[in-house]
Amino acid sequence: MEKHKLNISDMESGEVRIMDLTEETSIIVVKENDNYYAFKNLCPHQSRKMGNVELCGLSEIRCEHHGMKFNIKSGENTYSAGYFGIPKLDVLKIEIKDAEYYIQFPD
Ligand code: FES
């Protein structure tokens, strides 16, 4: 596991930030109210980066490619057009230590 420091303290509520931690590792961080949520930037629909993601509705993000929506807290697919078999987003835990934000990313 590798630990990465995240520069996210300046994010506004409703903001979505795509962060490339390494050449192969991209994550998405969303701030909703005072809470931060993070997940791998890999859409479970076609295993590709999600493109321009936006927060829509309550605690949902939408993938740019085919419009599927996922809950930012649980990672579950909330798109209701017969795609309930799609796996969850890979949700990542953000740690807060001494007012700094970190994420553990599996190798
Ligand atoms: S690749 Fe994300 S909805 Fe299809």
Image (cartoon, helix red, strand yellow):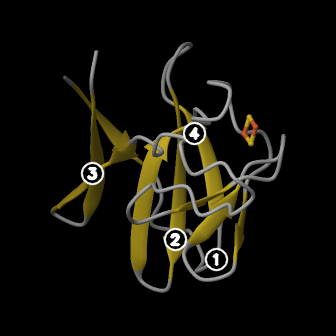
State the separation of the CA atoms marked 3 and 1.
19 Å
Foreground of the two, 107 or 65: 65
- Residue 49 circle label: none
Please give left or right for residue 96 compared with residue 47 in the image.
left
Sequence-earlier tag: 2 or 1: 1
- Location of mark 1 (residue): 14
Residue occupying the point 30% across, 55% down: 101
- Location of mark 3 (residue): 93
Q: Residues within 10 Å of mark 3 (few under 14, many from 20)?
A: few
Please tell me whether mark 4 sits on a helix, a strand or a loop.
strand
- Location of mark 4 (residue): 19
Dot 2 amino acid type: Lys
Residue 107, by quadrant, is: top left
Please tell me whether mark 3 sits on a helix, a strand or a loop.
loop
Foreground of the two, 81 or 99: 81
Q: Residues within 10 Å of mark 1 (few under 14, many from 20)?
A: some
Foreground of the two, 100 or 107: 107
Question: Where is the N terminus found, in terms of image quarters?
Answer: top left
Residue occupying the point 57% across, 39% down: 19
**In this rendering, is residue 23 above or below 5?**
above
For the residues bearing labels 2 and 1, Cβ distance under 8 angstroms: yes
Q: Position of residue 79 (x, y in %)?
A: 67, 60
- Location of mark 2 (residue): 31
Residue occupying the point 41% across, 40% down: 90
Dot 3 amino acid type: Lys
Sequence-earlier tag: 4 or 3: 4
Q: Position of residue 63 (x, y in %)?
A: 74, 49
